[in-house]
């Protein structure tokens, strides 16, 4: 996944500014993220997971298609655990074609990692920042 420093900073700041978990969508083309969409976490227990507001998600998905972009990734934060998919993250990885970006705020410096999750298998991807 290729993302601008500005886009990555926006995701990290979203994670730092809200509690407990935040989530969002990443759109672009050719593996290059050009749009970061901050979403509302409607999970009843947001300290243990995330669930995007379905109406907001549908609206953003329509906007992504209208702009000729594709959904490249889903991001969320782990405020008190490592940047690695939890069992719940794996269970809820419904889009095997997208990447899952996780921001951990466990340590002083945020840790950002990206994964593909398919059929319960986790494979780390490289994240490249540009600009």
Image (cartoon, rainbow, N blue to C red):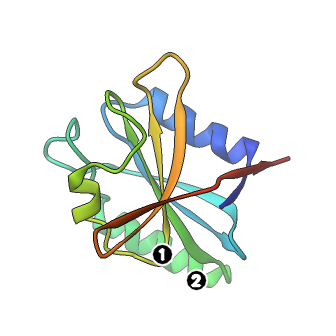
Q: Is residue 56 above or below residue 9?
A: below
Measuring from the top left, give residue 117's x and y in whole percent: 39, 67
Q: Is residue 121 above or below residue 20?
A: below
Q: Secondary structure at mark 2?
A: helix
At 64% from the left and 43% from the top, the residue drawn is 8
Mark 2–mark 1 distance (CA, rounded to whole Å): 6 Å
Q: Is residue 110 left or right of residue 55?
A: right
Q: Which mark is residue 65?
A: 2
Measuring from the top left, give residue 21's x and y in whole percent: 33, 39
At 55% from the left and 35% from the top, the residue drawn is 12
Give the farthest residue toward the right.
131
Asked whether the residues under the numbered discs 2 and 1 touch, taking CB atoms below 8 Å apart as contact, a structural biologist would say yes
In this view of the protein, which residue sits in the foreground, 54 or 121? 121
Q: Is residue 94 above or below residue 35?
A: below
Give the farthest residue toward the top.
108
| Quadrant holding the N terminus | bottom right
Number of residue marks: 2
Q: Residues within 10 Å of mark 2 (few under 14, many from 20)?
A: few
Measuring from the top left, give residue 75's x and y in whole percent: 46, 53
Q: Residues within 10 Å of mark 1 (few under 14, many from 20)?
A: some
Residue assigned mark 1? 61
At 43% from the left and 40% from the top, the residue drawn is 83
Q: Is residue 95 above or below residue 15?
A: below
Q: Is residue 26 left or right of residue 67?
A: left
Measuring from the top left, give residue 77's x and y in whole percent: 40, 40
In this view of the protein, which residue sits in the foreground, 74 or 88? 88
At 22% from the left and 53% from the top, the residue drawn is 87
The image quarter containing residue 59 is bottom left
Q: Secondary structure at mark 1?
A: helix
Q: Which mark is residue 96?
A: none
């Amino acid at each position: 996944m290729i993302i601008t420093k500005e886009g990555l900073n926006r995701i990290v700041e979203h994670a730092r500014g809200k509690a407990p978990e935040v989530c969002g969508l990443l759109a672009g083309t050719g593996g290059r993220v050009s749009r970061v969409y901050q979403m509302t976490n409607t999970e009843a227990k947001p300290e243990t997971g995330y669930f995007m507001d379905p109406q907001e998600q549908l609206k953003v998905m329509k906007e992504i298609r209208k702009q000729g972009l594709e959904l490249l990734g889903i991001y969320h934060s782990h405020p008190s655990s490592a940047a690695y998919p939890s069992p719940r993250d794996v269970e809820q990885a419904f889009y095997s074609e997208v990447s899952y970006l996780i921001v951990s705020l466990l340590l002083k410096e945020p840790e950002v990692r990206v994964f593909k999750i398919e059929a319960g298998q986790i494979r780390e991807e490289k994240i490249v920042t540009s600009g």
